Image: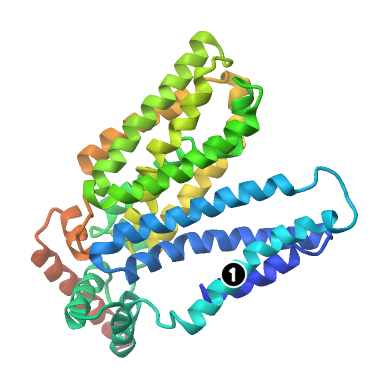
Amino acid sequence: MIVSDIVGIIALGLTLIAQYEVMLIGRLLAGFLGGVNNVVVAMYLVEISPLSMVGATGSFSIIVLEIFALVSFGLGFIVPSEKEGGFGGQIWRLLYFFPALLNIVRLLCLLMVFKHDTPFYCIEKNDKKEAMKGLNQIFNKNVEEEFNRIQSDVNAASTAGSVQIKDLFGRKYRKAFLLCLLLAVAQQLCGISVLFVYSNDIFSKSTDTPVFYTTLFGITNVVAVILSFKFVDKLGRKTLIIFGNITIGLVMLAFGLIAKISGEGNPLLKYLIVIWPLFFQASLGSLTFLYISEVLPDVGVGACISANWTTGFLIAQFYLQSVEAFGFEVPFLFFGVANFLCAVVFCGALVETRGKTKADIIAEYNLLPKELMNSINDYDEEYHKNSIASLGA
């Protein structure tokens, strides 16, 4: 995070230079760092939070994310529509400086306040002293108990201190990884990329004030995230994810069928889009990355988030072509069916993670008692050490 903040400040500095090639390099770097933060911040929050607070911490981070997304949208209204002189012509530079300011603030916080890495990472690197420093900063009591819990999670999550891509397809992680990969893709199959990128175009079919409804859509999105904070730890991850797939599936199918039967100008369509965030943020919006971070090691989280972003990119790129080729309603009918299919899979295979350690979750995915799973991990680690010793000999 420190490195990405430093590079982020440089990248956003480049965007302040009014030269196309330089600005493009700055934007590409900023986009790359957005992906890095998406992976690292999700892992950091799960690893730094007490077990009872993981859900609340993850939800609160989504609240902050969506509030600033709405702020970003609002700032777009003050960008001049044509070239201006004086202060008005420099507003775009102020807007690009704003995220750089956030990088500066976080960098100072990480260097001066939150100076320790996560206990999970420190234990994984056999640095107990640093892990205890971090734990003492988080907990007032039961520090040794928390250390032992995290030590158990580290042992369950890795073999000989690391997990590689090929390990995700091994017996320990295969089922969990494939389900998390589907969950990452399922979040995009809710239609989030289409609704956020093309909201004005979609609303313009059924109203003369698309910008107003796009703004209302953004406000509903933030309100939905705040409401989800209240019950994310009460109902459980699995229940809410399945609830989201079903309700979003119903909204998307209703949208597609109404557009097919009565035309894309039906006034009901805009209201269906406005209420969509209520179901999305109560489930897949606030829980997808949290769930993946609870289940998988860092390399698995990175792979799933890469799949999520790639799916979103492809959907956004080919949405207009699919509308032109097959009709306005077809993408939404596709999203509806896809969500119902995902709900069926998750209902039968997804493991509830609320209040469970990573060791418990991995054992449950392997349908084994935690003690037996630990003995298998010990065997795998001993086998790995012996293999290394044999290679050395």
Q: Type of residue at label 1?
A: Asn
> In this orientation, does residue 193 appear?
no
Q: Is residue 238 left or right of residue 367?
A: right
Q: Residue at x 88, y 50 (%)?
A: 84
Q: Quadrant of the C terminus?
A: bottom left
Q: Residue 279 at what x, y percent from top left?
A: 38, 36
The residue sitting at the top extreme is 262
Q: Which residue is mark 1?
A: 103
Q: Is residue 213 above or below residue 89?
A: above
> In this orientation, does residue 319 appear?
yes
Q: Is residue 90 left or right of residue 44?
A: right
Q: Residue at x 36, y 42 (%)?
A: 282
Q: Is residue 91 left or right of residue 249?
A: right
Q: Is residue 276 left or right of residue 54?
A: right
Q: Residue at x 17, y 61 (%)?
A: 360
Q: Is residue 29 above or below residue 215?
A: below
Q: Residue 1 at what x, y percent from top left?
A: 51, 72
The residue sitting at the right extreme is 85
